[in-house]
Image: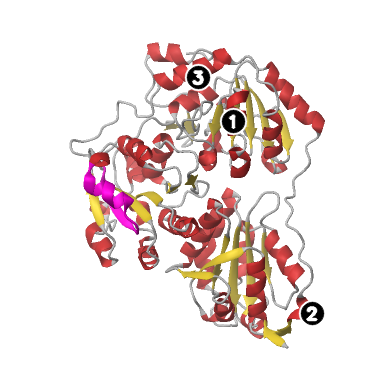
Amino acid sequence: MTEKYSDVLAQWLAELGYTHCFFVAGGNIMHLLESCSHTMTCVPVVHEVAAGIAAEYFNEVHLGSKAFAMVTAGPGLTNIVTALGGAWLESRELLVIGGQVKTADLNRGQVRQRGIQEIDGVAIAAPVAEKSLLVDKVVDRGTFAEMTYCGMSGRKGPVFLEIPLDVQGSKVERAELDTSTPAAVPAFEPIAEGTLAVIAQKLKDAKRPALLLGAGIDREVAAGLQDALAGLGVPVFLTWNAMDRMGSDHPMYFGRPNTWGQRYSNVLLQQSDLLIALGTRLSMQQTGFNWQGFAPVAEVVHVDCDREELEKGHPRVDLPVCGDANVVLKYLTTQPGGAWGEWVAFAREVKAALPLVEDGNNTGDGYLSPWVFADKLGALTKADDIVIPCSSGSAFTIMMQTFAQKYGQRIVTDKGLASMGYGLSGAIGAAVAGKGRRTILVEGDGGFIQNLQELGTAAANKLNLKIFIFDDNGYASIRMTQINYFGGRYVGCDTSTGLGIPKWEHLFAAYDIPVMRVGIGYEKDPEFLARMEAEGPAAFLVHIDPKQTYFPKITSRVTESGGMESNPLHRMSPELSEATAAQVFRYLPV
């Protein structure tokens, strides 16, 4: 008995663990969409980019099921490219299946377009995908599984499969296609026992060691090593993408160093004499643009699954190790702890001396300090909350500098592409994956307006989503750049310069989503607390000063040649007082 090929594909996807599909319907994907609607939960979104972002965040939450995105040909594909780019830079799994015109209507490179809405999606997606393939004929189950596995082994990344309409609708004999499915095995270079022993010896010999854990450290591995890391006694630092691998109250947790990092974390990391970086690519955002000044007195051991990242030339790396960083972390936690009590005591002293909520920022009367907001929000959250701290702008950096995570939370962001508009779509995917777990989104008003149409998706699905919007009349980060470097000449950054910001109360009312403004003392407001605990979506407008300053930060200056020159990580602005610098820069020149 013959079956429609799209029915077979839908069943294979379910067997591969996909339970959800985020999609925008279209004629060139109609067969596969109808088939998937029988085998999994299909969540319609308003714009294709939201489908890709939601699927990425759904998968990154890691709560036992997987999602993919489905789009039609032409604009369906071009609209989702931003999501492919974001997942590519973050090394995350994302399967995108795109429709295409009938094989007879493919232009095959002979003309610009033959079929209606035809565009070469495979060529467009190729630079931001592990594999970008045109499935222009029926393939068996094993071959299809191998196509999807491309983005799961080794360094992860998106996969784009483009399936013409007639291939989707063709009649096939399932029995002839049911070949065995290969196992998805991570492809890591093996790390020799001798190399592990060398790293362990370096750790034993160090006086001021530090572990920097990136997203290459699996949540499950980190969960099993919480006590072991406490017993090891080495200060642990987390990258932004690994923010939820530890709770902020872990005895060996010492924050998130970064260009926009926590000052005390930057100061401490820069004074380590051995830095073991595990599962992080050590990007310029992590090391600072002045990467020559990263870890200036440390020997740097860098473990990553991508050899090209180890050999890119920045920052300086003394011992590059290609392989699975989880293997190294598990090995190190089996080793006896060293004599690092003085170093840990100093780290705690620096942490106490450099609080996350600093004095010195200008917050106008009646406005809520964004640092105070994030600090209070962290205290209000629960260990099973999902937190989406957006992906760009001041709201993002405030959360990453100040929010105190609880162990057990899922925290997902997308900092590589740092695109505005990611927050709401990512929160939707995370909330669907969470199956009722409260999802908290913090987003700037400028970023939120870039994808606000997905409020309809949140409302229609009655998601338990709490939306916090920094209401500061536009693009705060761009506004500060124009103040700092161009004498305050504002161009397209707020309503006075032509940027369209909605009347928020009217916008949320259109979707029947309750909304309220929050200000100073919001954490004690009974109405606010009740809305936070209620099921379903709710919005909160955070009253932020449009002229709010954002310190500490790594400052840069424009050189005479027009280039930029930045301070190293430990030299955040404003500069510390002489007394404080003398206290916290014990192992660095003041």
- The image shows residue 396 at horizontal and vertical percentages of 41, 43
Q: Which of the labelled discs sits on residue 176, or is there none?
A: 2
Say if residue 472 shows up in the picture: no
Q: Nearer the viewer, mark 2 or mark 3?
A: 2
The secondary structure type at the circle numbered 2 is helix
Which of the two residues, 552 or 29, is positioned nearer the viewer here?
Answer: 29
> Would you name the residue on which mark 1 appears?
227
> Would you name the residue on which mark 3 appears?
347
Answer with mark 1 or mark 2, whichever residue precedes in sequence: 2
Is 144 in the magenta? no
- The image shows residue 432 at horizontal and vertical percentages of 47, 60
The secondary structure type at the circle numbered 1 is helix
Distance from label 3 to label 1 (Cα)? Answer: 19 Å
User: What residue type is disc 3 on?
Assistant: Ala
User: What residue type is disc 1 on?
Assistant: Asp
User: What residue type is disc 2 on?
Assistant: Glu
The residues colored magenta run 525-544
Dot 1, crowdedness within 10 Å: few (<14), some or many (≥20)? few
Dot 2, crowdedness within 10 Å: few (<14), some or many (≥20)? few
- The image shows residue 67 at horizontal and vertical percentages of 56, 62
Q: Residue at x 40, y 56 (%)?
A: 424
